[in-house]
Image: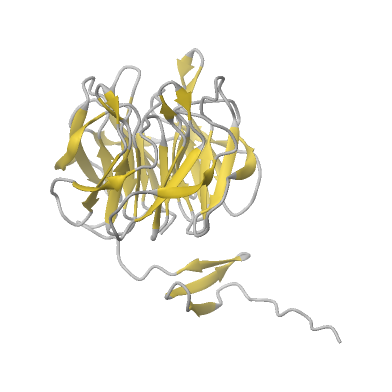
Amino acid sequence: MSINPVEIPTGAVRYNTDSNKMEVYVGDTWMEVAVSSPNLDGGGRGLVMAGNTPDQTNIIQFITISTAGNSQDFGDLTALIQSGPGATGSSTRGLLGGGQQWPALSNKIDFVTFSTTSNAIDFGDLTVARRNLIGNGNETRGVFAGGNADPSLQDVIDFVTIASTGNAVDFGNLTSSRKQLGGNASSPTRGLFYGGDTGSFTNVIDFISIPTTGNAQDFGDLIAAIIENKGASSSTRALMMGGYISPANVNTIQFVTITTLGNAQNFGDLTEEKGNSATASDCIRGVRMGGGNGNTNVIDYILIATEGDAVDFGDLITGQGEGAGCSNAHGGL
């Protein structure tokens, strides 16, 4: 006798004894229920770390994403870093990995506690010293992908457990080796990586299942082959903001629905044409901070759930590109 499967209604709640987390059923996926508040000074906190001013810098700046205004000083990294580190965060900690600690490439991972304003602390090391990589993650795991360990391009994905400290371990591989790719866009279960330089520009979007380990899989395609475009997300929608399409920076914003597979669609435009920005989100707003190829101090934002052009948020302390951003309220939490 066959047994008919029981259909799980959207909104059903369960306790996962493996992860010790409450979960809710959304679409076709069990997602963790947030049990802590990201609110600091009235809202989620976004960080921009390291970068090119045009000198390498150790400065960490922060904003309150739900408001508008200029960034403020948060503290300092453990070293001067530029050239595309990757960043990610949980609801309590922000992590920065890799980049260039001139003249050498860095394998360092630093961390800060979002609720304080203080200097970063050493977390551990990446599996490969590299620059032009990207970060992603959920409440439990921080993931770092791609980059270049001069002169070789990397398909490496490695991860750490954010609540602990220690060295990263192997997660799997991207669908191709590349640098200057985008990310910073995830749900609690999926992380996206897109675009980048494989020796030529690519429009490929990859995805991984963050709670497991394994190689990335094909998700779909961007509107055009692009590098240096950074992301932000709610738990359902991922944005790709700005970037570089030869021979110039662009202001294009694209989006995909994280739970599906498919190609990106047009969302709107940034207030200026910039790539190599730092980005962050609080699930309601996506924020773009600074950008390279003529460093800018401009911060602008969009509403993730709608489509339209970005509007002015405020200014960074100084013009900055090639840094990395994260928040304590993004779509992966």
Indicate the position of residue 254 as horizontal and vertical percent values: 53, 36
Relative to 138, 237 lies left or right: right
Quadrant occupied by the C terminus: bottom left
Indicate the position of residue 216 as horizontal and vertical percent values: 58, 45
Residue 251 seen by the camera: yes
Residue at x-position 22% and y-position 44%: 62
Residue at x-position 22% and y-position 58%: 40
Relative to 10, 135 lies left or right: left
249 to 262, vertically: above or below:
above
Quadrant in the rendering for residue 44? bottom left
Colouring scheme applied when the structure was drawn? secondary structure
Residue at x-position 37% and y-position 30%: 131
Indicate the position of residue 128 as horizontal and vertical percent values: 39, 37
Quadrant in the rendering for residue 38? bottom left
Indicate the position of residue 36 as horizontal and vertical percent values: 31, 68
Residue 308 seen by the camera: no
304 to 240, vertically: above or below:
below
Quadrant occupied by the N terminus: bottom right
Q: Residue furthest right?
A: 1
Residue at x-position 28% and y-position 25%: 104
Q: Residue furthest top?
A: 247
Relative to 20, 238 lies left or right: right
Q: Which is more toward the observer, 142 or 15?
A: 142
Q: Which is more toward the observer, 29 or 127?
A: 127
Relative to 278, 185 lies left or right: right
**How many labels sit on residues?**
0
238 to 278, vertically: above or below:
below
